[in-house]
Amino acid sequence: MANLFEKRSELFLRAEILDQGRAIQGAFKDDNDVAREVPVIKHFLAQAMARTESSTKTRALVCGNTVIIKPSCLAPLEVHLLAKTFSDAGLPKGVVNVVYGKGDVVGKALSASSVVKALAFKFSFSLGNSHPMIICYDADLDEALPIAIKGSFLQNEGQNVHSINRIFVQASLLETFTDRFIRVVQRLKIGSPHESSIQIIAIIQGAVNDGAEILCGGKIPKFDSKLDRGYFLEPTVLGGFQSSVVNSINSLEVQGPVVRLIPFININDAIDGANATLYGLSASVWCKDISLAHTIADRLNVGSVWINSWLPNNPSMPYEGWKSSGLGRTGGAYSMDFYTEIKTVHVKV
């Protein structure tokens, strides 16, 4: 099954682009929803036990459940291909089922059915985030800058739940970081997601106006083609913040290519600013002083913290969101909880 998924990775890539408008280099073979399932399936087959993190669909299957999937009306292609691949791999009929239709009709019927024993959404365990990236005075900018660009703009065009929303930069590095960051952002190209040279495409619902200084972008581009019918926004960098709490945007999750650069002098200010939001899914800390990095990580009110990296995930580790960012947890042994029932049998001997 895993081998068949790998063979069809290019098809899943194209389906994801058509479904979501995701830029092609942001959905490559090792960086899309299906690609992340391959090692999960292989791990399960090798270990013969469902103690690994995977998507909702795989977790339910490896725990012995049958599954009904209702994809979005706006993005059904990848799920359709997924079901066909399961079937072609020899999965018995009726184990994975796909139903299409509007949520207020099909979704309502499924949720009201007594036959359905559990309901799960794609992001059941992550209900929003406003990822803060904290760059300390001794951070390696050669490593941090490419990640800041990818995490802010290139990973699903700023619409990933772990997308970097806020970058806290220690004052001594602010000028250097801002200059290098802006120069790269200004070279990003906007256009069709099918073109491999495209580095950013985004859909933004609404506009944000918080009075901050626009350091880069912020405009709706014009195209002399059918792309003009789409929803695009230039990669946008906001600055000019005197503190992290003055502007309300710094407590929000912005689903799109909009990132804020926020200076800090004292590390306590960065931590307080990072925590000044309803969300608490993840954060990243860039610092050569690992002791200091651990101190910062301990004080951040989030479920996951990456030190000198961003987004690597070990499927055996727990995963959860704090505050308004999550409901329950998954990863490792926790992956089994939602999809299994516990029964205790007492026998007198």
Image (cartoon, grey):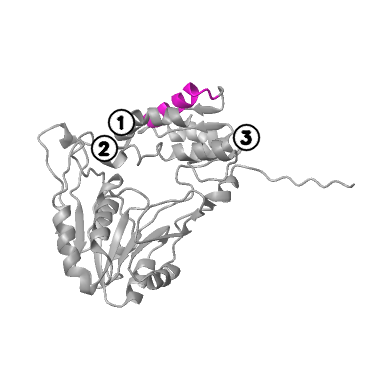
Please name the residue that numbered disc 2 is placed on: 24
Residue 330 vs residue 71, the one in the foreground? 330
Q: Residues within 10 Å of mark 1 (few under 14, many from 20)?
A: some
Name of the residue lying farthest toward the right:
349
- Sort mark 3 into few (<14), some (14-19) or many (20+) by Cα contacts within 10 Å: few
Q: Residue 322 in the image: state x and y as whole percent.
A: 47, 60
Three-letter code for the amino acid on which mark 3 is drawn: Ser
Give coordinates of residue 342: x percent, y percent: 69, 46
Quarter assignment of residue 21: top left
| Residue 114: mark in rendering | 3
Q: Which residues make up the magenta segment?
A: 76-91
Q: Is residue 84 a member of the stretch shown in magenta?
A: yes
- SS label for mark 1: helix
Residue closest to the eye, 200 or 294: 294
Give the residue pinned by disc 1: 14
- Gap in angstroms between the C-alphas marked 3 and 2: 41 Å
Q: Is residue 101 above or below residue 201?
A: above
